[in-house]
Amino acid sequence: MMCAARRQSPDCHLVSLSTIDLHSHSTHSDGLLRPRELVGRAAARGVKVLALTDHDDTGGLAEARSAAAECGIRLVNGVEISVTWGGQTVHVLGLGIDPGHAGLASGLAHLREGRRGRAEMIAGGLKKIGVEGSLEGARAYVTNPELVGRAHFARFLVERGYARDVSSVFRKYLAPGKPGHVAHQWASLAQAVGWIAASGGIAVLAHPGRYPMNDAQRDGLFSGFKEAGGHGVEVVTGSHTSRQFHTYARYAQRYGLLASAGSDFHGVGESHRDLGDLPPLPEGCTPVWADW
Ligand code: AMP
Ligand code: MN
Ligand code: MN
Ligand code: MN
């Protein structure tokens, strides 16, 4: 099959786009595009190096790799691992992993298994406030039966008119303290970093600006991540403001971490930034791709 990028003309101003995007999602987790469509879109937008980083799952990498070969772009094998640290959920990206590594694969399988029970509890919480049938409703949006996520519940709640968009659903129903919130135990920081390193990848702390933490907690997270063997931090990412690009460039320097950049694209209308829509890393950062 011909690469989508070679069939379509780009719908964007290529000069303002980055050729490297190291954070994206497909239908193997909660993204809206199949791996092949995602890669085609990235290529059409001028991306040359793309990491597919689905939540707790690497099942989309094979299709993405074959599409990337057709489009002439480089695919980085990635994953975004859900972690519990200090009672909060944080995300750790694995870049350059080997999806066939037994330790990584069994760790991710365990996380996906935990999502089943969590989904039932989310549905139970929503039922208490009168939202019926949300588990079945969310499942209608699930494209990987092993990967039920909050985004699938959010899409169902939008469909039923409970909120006008996915972000509003998170604020009103799924955030801590709201009826559909479930305190879930994910992997430990040490486990996630350990699985990534054992499979030959590098661990990158994803979107640190998203975590509601005070300075002491944030320093604790960075220290713990560094002690666990973490390599990098996502400095430029869709959910960071330009001020946060600079804040986390300083964290990278202070903790001796490499800097990464990725859109965290999930689909049109559900993401802050499109594929490759990323400014350069702030000065003084050493990119994770420096020796690629
Ligand atoms: P989960 O891993 O199932 O807890 O879902 C996490 C995913 O939910 C994130 O990767 C985003 O795709 C989505 N998400 C989390 N918070 C928000 C938000 N405030 N607005 C939109 N999507 C969100
Ligand atoms: Mn997501
Ligand atoms: Mn994330
Ligand atoms: Mn993500």
Image (cartoon, helix red, strand yellow):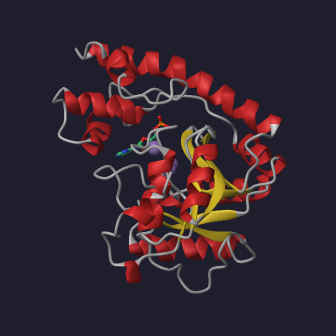
Kindly give the residue lying farthest to the front in the view shown: 1
Query: Residue at the spot x=72%, y=56% of the render?
Result: 96
Q: Is residue 57 above or below residue 70?
A: above
Give residue 252's position: percent from left, percent from top.
64, 72
Whether residue 212 is visible to the viewer of this picture, yes or no, is: no
Q: Is residue 130 left or right of residue 243?
A: left
Seen from the viewer's position, the closer of residues 236 and 217 is 236
Residue 2 is left or right of residue 140, and the answer is: right
The residue drawn where x is 63% and y is 40% is 58
- Comparing 252 with 107, the one in front is 107
On the image, the x and y values in percent for residue 113 come to 61, 22
Note whether residue 285 is visible.
yes
Task: Identify the residue at horizontal 41%, vertical 69% (top origin).
Answer: 45
Tell me the quarter of the picture where residue 130 sits.
top left
Task: Provide residue 80's location: percent of width, then percent of height.
Answer: 59, 47
Query: Does residue 279 lie above or below 151 as drawn?
Result: below
In percent of width and height, residue 133 lies at 30, 13
Q: Residue 25 or 88: which is nearer the viewer? A: 25
Q: Nearer the viewer, residue 147 or 254?
A: 147
